[in-house]
Image (cartoon, coloured by chain):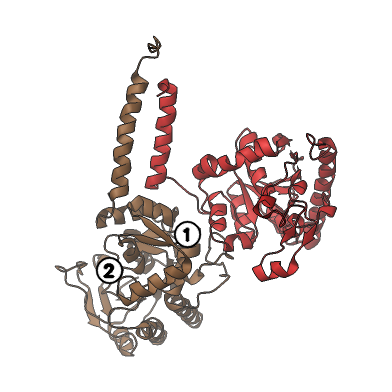
Chain colours: A red, B brown
Amino acid sequence: MTGPDGARDLAELLSFLRRRLTGEYEIDEFGFDPELTDRVLLELVRPLYRHWFRVETFGMDNVPGDAGALVVANHSGTIPLDGLMLQVALHDDHPRRRAVRLLGADLVYQLPLLGHLARKSGHTLACREDADRLLRKGELVGVFPEGFKGVGKPFSERYRLQRFGRGGFVASAIRAGVPIVPCAIVGAEEIYPKIGDLPLLARALGLPYVPITPFFPWLGLLGLVPLPSKWMIGFGEPIRTDEFDPADADDPVLVFNLTDHVREVIQQHLNELRLRRGHAFPPIL
Amino acid sequence: MTHTVLVTGVSRHIGARVASVLAADPDIDRVIGVDTVPPPSLSGDGGVPAGRTEFVRVDLRGSDIAQVIAAADVDTVIHMSLLSAPPGGGGRTFMKEHNVIGAMQLLGACQRSATIRRVVVRSTTAVYGSSPHDPAVFTEDTEPAEPPGHGYAKDAAEVEGYVRGFARRRRDVTVSTLRFAGFMGCGVDSPLTRYFTQPVLPTMLGFDPRLQFVHEDDAVEVLRRMATEDHPGTFNVAGDGVLLLSQCARRAGLPSLPVPPAVFRSLGDLARRLGLVAFSPEQLRLMRHGRVVDTTRLAAALGWRPKIPTAAAFEEFVRARDLAGGLPAAMTDLLLSAVEQAVERAVNRPANPPPVRR
C-alpha cells in the first residue's frame, strides 16, 4: 500500500471492476458505454495517439462545448485509424471532453466484435435516421463523407479530397440546424502508403479493397504496424446552417452547393496544415 | 363508451391480467375472455383472479368467434392471442394458423359487426427484424432493411397487414396496433424469459445485442388505456433505456458462454428438441444484432409513458426468479469487501507523522 492516495486509487479501481462485473453501468440507446470507452478502449489507443503519431490539435475552440454539431473530416490511411485518433482528440484535448459519435460504413456493423465495439464506443451506422437522432439529442457527430473512396485511395493521391458522397450529412445538419465543423487530419495518409491493390482477393473476401503497401503483405503481420508519421488535426471555423429552413434539406441544389463549399474549406485547411507540419517523418529524415 | 370488451388469448398471463383489470372497471359492463384452452386455475401456477370475466372457449381458427361477437354486442376487441413459440403438442403449422388465420377470422368477424367501435391488436417489435443495416433505433415508420421471413415475427407482420386492411375498410372503427418489446415480469413465460432462466447463457461470439423489455404491469396499463380511450395508429411499447445482453448476464449473475454462431444454432436446435428453449431464426438474429425502438409516439398519444425502465423490469424478473446471487457475484463481493476494508484502514491511517521507516 502506498498511503492514502494509492489506497483511494485502488478503491476506485475496485469499484470500477465491481460495476463492470455486476453490469451496473449505463449505456445509451445506441449502445454507447462511456465508461468502457474512456477507461479501456481509448486507453488502448492513447499510446498510439500520444507517442506513436504525436498528434497535435488546433482550433479546438471551434468545436462547441455542449451543443450538437457535425464534424466533417477527410478520410485516409487505408485502415481507418483516423476515426480513432479523432475520437481521442475530441475527448482528451477538448475542454469539455466531448464524445464524438462517428457514422460508419455498414461493413463495420456486419463484422463480429468490430461492430459491437464500434457501438460500445459510441459510433453508429451512417444513415439518415441515426444522424438526425444524434444531432437532435445535441451530440457531437462525426462523418467522413469520402468513405472508402477516401480511406482506400492510392498513396499518389494523398491529401486530395475525393467526392463527398451525396451530401446526406449536409442535409442532416440543416434539418437539425447545427453547425458543420470542418476538420482536416494530416498524417494518416502516410501510415500505410497504399501502392497497389488486390481486387480479386478483395472481391472474394467481400472487402472494399485489399491493400499492398511497401510492407504489407511482404512482412506479414509486421507489415500491419502503422508508420510513425507526425499527425495534426485542425478544426476550422463552424459553418452555420441555422439560417436555413429545415425544409431546405430537401433542396438538392442547395445541399450540393453547401457540400461543395464544405469540401473546399476542408481541402484548403488540409493544404495549410500539411505545410505547417512539414515532413511526415521528421526524426528520420 | 366501452361497454362490452372481448379479450382474446385470455388463458395466457398478460391476456388474463388485462381481462381482470378491465373487469374491475365499473364503467365496463361485460368482459368476455376467449382462448383455445381454459385459463389456469387461480390456485395453480400463473392464475390471475378473473373477476367478472366470462370465459368462452373458442378456437380462433374457426368462425365461432363471429357468433360470440354478434351475440354479445361487443364494442371493443383486444386481440392478445399471438403465440411467440409453438405451444406444447402443436407445431409451427398450428402456431402459424393460430396467429394468422385466427387474426383473419377475428378481423372478419369485426368487419361484419355493427357494434364494434375499437380494436386493439397486440403485435411485437420483432416485426422490425434485426440486421446490421438498420438504424440503431426504430420508429413506427422505419422500413426494416430485412423484413422478418420466419416464425413469430413474420406472423406478426402478416397480422399487421390484415389489421391495416381492416382499418381501411372500417374507417369508423378506432384501430390501435401495439408493438411490444419483450415482456418481462415474474408471471411472464416467453422464449426470452426461458432463455434467462438457463444456468449458463450461450451467447453469439463477437456479438452483444442491445435489448429492451417492457414490464408486464406497464404492458397491462397500456392495453387498459388503449381499450378505454381512442388512440388510433401503431405504437411501439418498451421500457425506457437499453440493456446489452452481456449486461443482463452480469446483472443476473449468470455466466455467459460465447459460442460461434453456427454452434449457437445447433445448440438452439438441440434445446428445442429437448423442449428447453425454442429459438427460432428471427430470435437468433435478435441475439446477434439486437433491437431498440423509440416510444415517443406512445408517450405523446397517451400523455403517459411506461413507468418501469428496461433495467428495472429485468432486475425484478431476476429477483422474482431468484436468479441473482450466483457464484461470480458472491465471489466478487467477498473479494471486494476484503480489499475495501484494507483500503479503509489505509485511508484512515493519519498522514502525519509519516510512517516510520525500518
Q: Do circles 1 and 2 both sit on a common chain? A: yes
Residue B80 in view, yes or no: no
- Return the chain for callout 1: B
Which tag is nearer the camera, tag 1 or tag 2?
1
Q: Which mark is residue B209?
A: 1
Along the horizontal axis of the image, is A170 left or right of B63? Answer: right
Q: In the shown orientation, is residue B143 left or right of residue B320?
A: right
Q: Earlier in the sequence, mark 1 or mark 2?
A: 2
Label 1–label 2 contact, CB within 8 A: no
The Cα–Cα distance between marks 1 and 2, rounded to whole angstroms, is 27 Å
Which quadrant of the rendered structure holds the N terminus of chain B? bottom left
Instruction: Please say if B165 is above or below A160.
Output: below
B181 or B161: nearer the eye?
B181
The residue sitting at 81% across, 53% down in the picture is: A155
Q: Secondary structure at mark 1?
A: loop
Nearest the eye: A273 or B317: A273
Going by the numbered disc 2, the residue's amino acid type is: His
Circle 2 is placed at which residue position? B13
Q: Residue furthest top?
A: B353
Where is residue A159? Give x, y as percent: 82, 49
Q: Nearer the viewer, residue B277 or B55?
A: B277
User: In terms of image quadrants, where is residue B153?
Assistant: bottom left
B259, B315: nearer the viewer: B259
Q: Position of residue B284 (x, y in %)?
A: 45, 69
Residue at coordinates 44% horizontally, 29% vertically from top-left? A9
* Dot 2: element: helix
Q: Classify A234 as above or below B101.
A: above
| Residue A198: x %, y % from top left | 74, 65
Q: Amino acid at mark 1?
A: Pro
Say which residue appears at 67% left-offset and 51% top-offset: A224
Rate crowding at label 1 as few (under 14), some (14 to 19) or many (20 or more) other CA atoms within 10 Å.
Answer: many
The chain holding disc 2 is B
